[in-house]
Amino acid sequence: MSSKPAAARAPTRAQARQLEQLRARLLASTHWDAEYAGSLSNHLPMALAALHRLGASDKRLADYTERYTPRLHPAPAIETWPAGDPWRDRFGDPHAWPIYRSLFRQWLSHEGIADVLQQVLPPLVQGCGAAAFHGMIRVAYAFEAVAPEALADGLAYWACRWMDLGPAQDVPAGTAPVRDPGKLLPALAALAPSHAPLIALRMFDAAQLRGFDAAVAPLKIDEDTLPRLARLAAQRYARSGNFTVLHLVTSAHALRVLLPFIDDGAPAVAAYWRAYAAGVVAAREVPGRAAALLDWPVLQQAAVASDDDHLVKLVDACRQEQAAHGGAPDWQRAASRAVQDAGRRGGATRAVKEPAC
């Protein structure tokens, strides 16, 4: 299920200068803690990388940073990882971010990005629902920006918020395997969702429900599973505008970016499906009619002008996924929904208060 990463095309001089400006801003963003206001995820590095890819100028990145950072807290001092301790020993320990930052910075400096990702992603992806997928999303953006310090921080955040949702389930004997995940959504929607305040907490609660394993197990994992899940998330978001479903769209994009570094992709996709299914239960989704289709230049312009970190990331992820998968404009319609909903809330440039993540 895996293919090796393709060689990147050499950037133009202007693109290289813009990329260096982005990397400088991502390096500066490492001065901030991974979370704020208790346990809300710091979206600044992800939003900066998405804005850059959408065509934002360095001045726009500076403006966005100035507006976003007042909510953040300075990062705690980096602590040294104890020599000889197994690197997985602190998985899921939210206090371990400072010590994981040290570990991953050293690891990346000695072995390089590709080698480290190939070693750490298989175990990390088993807890990919960490912080409502934001660990994985942070890592994907930092990797694409080739920003080692931001990548170390993303890996550290993923590790310290790693969330065990239980092992992937085999298709039960006598049960016909299902290739279309959409056919399993009714069984998931029938489960009673948690009312916990954070998406990740509701996902964890969902995975403990009686009936969750039975609803998840029939999906047959193959090379087309992730594209199906990605398209399904886009279709569902286009019809509902649901905030939790938005994270299924952006996380599917992140896993597609990182999957080439995992030699055996099937266990990774199986773990992601389990977290994705928990997200479906957590969403409390109310589907409606799909949004009208807007042109990509309109969507990009709206996202670049927006101070809503989730809108920025969604439009960027949708643009990348549409280019990767093609076919029906499902991701374009999802991005259109986000922009139109933002307009109804008072304009795409207004930061939005959503359920906590």
Image (cartoon, helix red, strand yellow):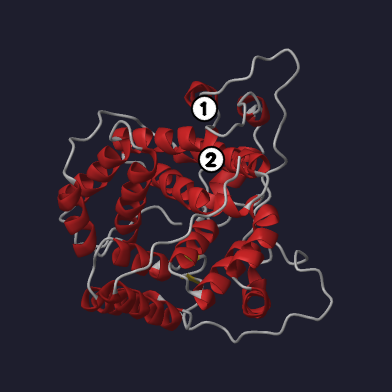
Q: Which mark is residue 2?
A: none
**Mark nearer the N terminus (2 vs 1):** 1
From the viewer's perspective, tell me whether residue 30 is left or right of residue 22: right
Element class at badge 2 = helix
Q: Residue at x 43, y 68 (%)?
A: 145
Mark 2 or 1: in front is 1
Between 328 and 275, the one lying in front of the other is: 328
Three-letter residue code for mark 1:
Pro
From the viewer's perspective, tell me whether residue 169 is left or right of residue 336: right
Read off the residue under disc 1. Answer: 181
Q: Position of residue 182 (x, y in %)?
A: 47, 25
**Quarter-of-image position of residue 230:** top left
* Vertical order, 91 against 22 (above or below): above
Q: Residue at x 52, y 82 (%)?
A: 75
Q: Position of residue 214 (x, y in %)?
A: 66, 25
Q: Spatial distance from mark 2 to mark 1, Cα to Cα?
A: 10 Å
Read off the residue under disc 2. Answer: 276
Three-letter residue code for mark 2:
Tyr
Between 261 and 166, the one lying in front of the other is: 261
* Vertical order, 139 against 84 (above or below): above
**Quarter-of-image position of residue 144:** bottom left
**Quarter-of-image position of residue 302:** bottom left
Marks 2/1 in contact by CB < 8 Å: the verdict is yes
Evaluate whether residue 180 shows in this view: yes
* Vertical order, 284 against 22 (above or below): above
Q: Residue at x 52, y 32 (%)?
A: 224
The number of numbered badges drawn on the structure is 2
